[in-house]
Amino acid sequence: MSNDVINILDEFFSVQELIDFTTTLSKFHRIQGSRDLEKAARYIKEELKSLRNFDINEYIYEYNIQYGLHLPVVGWDVNECYVELIKPQRKRL
């Protein structure tokens, strides 16, 4: 992380605010092409908009269009899942 980013974070946020921000952001499933990735981006944008003297440029990208070297992304969401313990014995949790 560059010193510029660290200095900006230090200037605008307390340590507790950064911990809270990271905790909230980690609740989003940030899988490429998922709805929660977009929600996480909106959350970041709204947090930054609340700061004075902070310019935000927003770019809208379509999932089915190639942008430069970036290939189109297949959008998808997790609707159901399960967790399985492998050791000491295989068991669905």
Image (cartoon, rainbow, N blue to C red):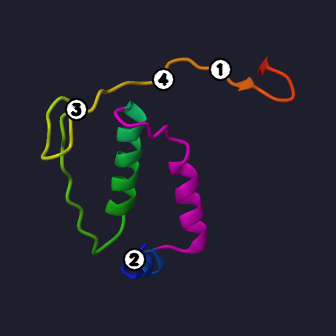
Instruction: Say what secondary structure mark 2 lies in.
Output: loop
Look at label 1 and name its amino acid.
Tyr
Q: Position of residue 50 (x, y in %)?
A: 36, 63
The residue under label 1 is: 82
Looking at marks 3 and 4 on the same chain, the residue that comes earlier in the sequence is marked by 3
- Viewer-proximal residue among 85 and 4: 85
Compared across the picture, whether 89 is left or right of 58 comes to: right
* Amino acid type indicated by mark 2: Ser
Give the alpha-carbon distance from disc 3 to disc 1, as whole Å.
28 Å
Q: Earlier in the sequence, mark 1 or mark 2?
A: 2
Q: Residue at x 29, y 27 (%)?
A: 74
Please state which amino acid type lies under the numbered disc 3.
Tyr
- The numbered mark, 2 or 3, whose residue comes first in the sequence reads 2
Which residue position holds label 4? 78
Task: Give me the C-alpha separation between circle 2 and circle 4.
Answer: 34 Å
Report helix, strand or loop for mark 3: loop
Pointers 4 and 1 in contact (C-beta within 8 Å): no
Which range of residues does the magenta coloring cover? 13-33
Q: Mark 2 or mark 4: which comes first in sequence?
A: 2
Q: Is residue 70 left or right of residue 15?
A: left
Mark number displayed over residue 2: 2
Above or below for 90 versus 2? above
Of badges 2 and 4, nearer the viewer stands: 2
